[in-house]
Amino acid sequence: MLVTQRKLTFQDRELMSGLGAIEVIHYQLVVDYGAQLEDLVIAGEYGFIGDLVERQITRNRFLRSTKRGKEILKIIRIQFGRKISPLEASQLINSGRLQLPGIVELLHWGIEHPEHQRQSPIVALGAMTLASGLRHLVYLDSDQISGRDLAARSYDDLLSPTVRFLTIDPL
């Protein structure tokens, strides 16, 4: 559910300035922490799921949330508009009093907001997994052939200026 896109508040401008972001948009997202990851992937109706993601998409491969039941989250979607590493983006987001969503929040976002994924890649920096001893970031991507993809890339790769990051506003 999109929270009414409003004019930027002083707090939004302050957040953008502090993060070096070019876009800050607020949303609400209902997340069911009891849902199985496999069921969320199916509900997302992705045109393509990378091999690595398919092998890794079990709850024991990702950091576990201590949350239970359903919760309405305040999501702030941020775009930096420049190439940025996941580590730098995480540090900036954490410095801005925001939290990093994980795989459960990312998959719920893909179900509720598929149109955003078609515009640009969507990253939740807490959606990280280990495979063959390397850290990989699972993200929502778009593709002209399959439409919407659930993909993974090395955590050490620079991310494109078009990437939009999901964050959780804890307030």
Image: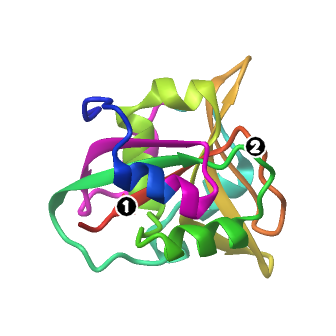
Q: Which residues are magenta?
A: 16-45
Relative height, residue 37 to residue 59 (above, below): above
Tell which residue pokes out farthest to the top in this image.
145
- Res. 26 image quadrant: top left
Q: How is the image coloured?
A: rainbow
Mark nearer the N terminus (1 vs 2): 2
Q: Nearer the viewer, residue 158 or 70?
A: 158
Residue 127 at x, y = what percent?
A: 55, 64
- Res. 37 image quadrant: bottom left
Image disc number at residue 168: 1
Relative height, residue 159 to residue 5 (above, below): below
**At 23% across and 66% down in the image, what residue appears?**
171
| Helix, strand or loop at mark 2 | loop
- Res. 56 image quadrant: bottom right
Image disc number at residue 161: 2
Residue 37 makes an appearance in the image: no
